[in-house]
């Protein structure tokens, strides 16, 4: 995890990290992209929504 946690995290940086197999290694990338498609939104928007949702409950998540 980043020293600043979720603060300032951008979808672009998450997409870049997704290319690294060791980043969230057990997460199926296809599930993420197909989930965004199923919602009818761009992947970057989906990632932004997830970041925002996680920021709202960061304490509960231990972030």
Image (cartoon, helix red, strand yellow):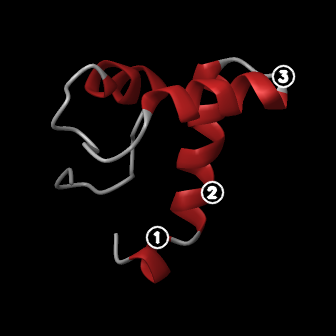
Please name the residue that numbered disc 3 is placed on.
Answer: 40
Taking the image as shown, residue 56 lies to the left or right of residue 40, namely left
For disc 2, the neighbor class at 10 Å (few under 14, some 14 to 19, many from 20) is: few
Front-most of residues 10 and 43: 43
Q: Secondary structure at mark 2?
A: helix
Q: Choose mark 1 or mark 3, whichever is in front.
A: 3
**Upstream in sequence: badge 1 or badge 3:** 3
Q: CA distance from mark 1 to mark 3?
A: 26 Å
Residue 55 drawn above or below residue 44:
below
Image quarter in which the N terminus is found: bottom left
Q: Quadrant of residue 36?
A: top right
Q: Residues within 10 Å of mark 3 (few under 14, many from 20)?
A: few
Q: CA distance from mark 3 to mark 2?
A: 18 Å
| C-alpha span from label 1 to label 2 | 9 Å
Q: Helix, strand, or loop for circle 3?
A: loop
- Residue closest to the far right: 40
Q: Which is closer to the viewer, label 3 or label 2?
A: 3
- Residue 28 left/right relative to 40: left
Secondary structure under tag 1 reads: helix
Residue at which label 1 appears: 58
**Disc 2 marks which residue?**
53
At 16% across and 55% down in the image, what residue appears? 3
């Amino acid at each position: 995890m980043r020293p600043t946690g979720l603060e300032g995290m951008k979808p672009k940086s998450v997409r870049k990290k997704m290319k690294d197999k060791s980043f969230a290694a057990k997460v199926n990338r296809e599930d993420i992209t197909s989930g965004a498609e199923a919602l009818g939104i761009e992947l970057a928007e989906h990632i932004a929504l997830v970041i925002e949702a996680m920021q709202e409950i960061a304490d509960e998540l231990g972030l």
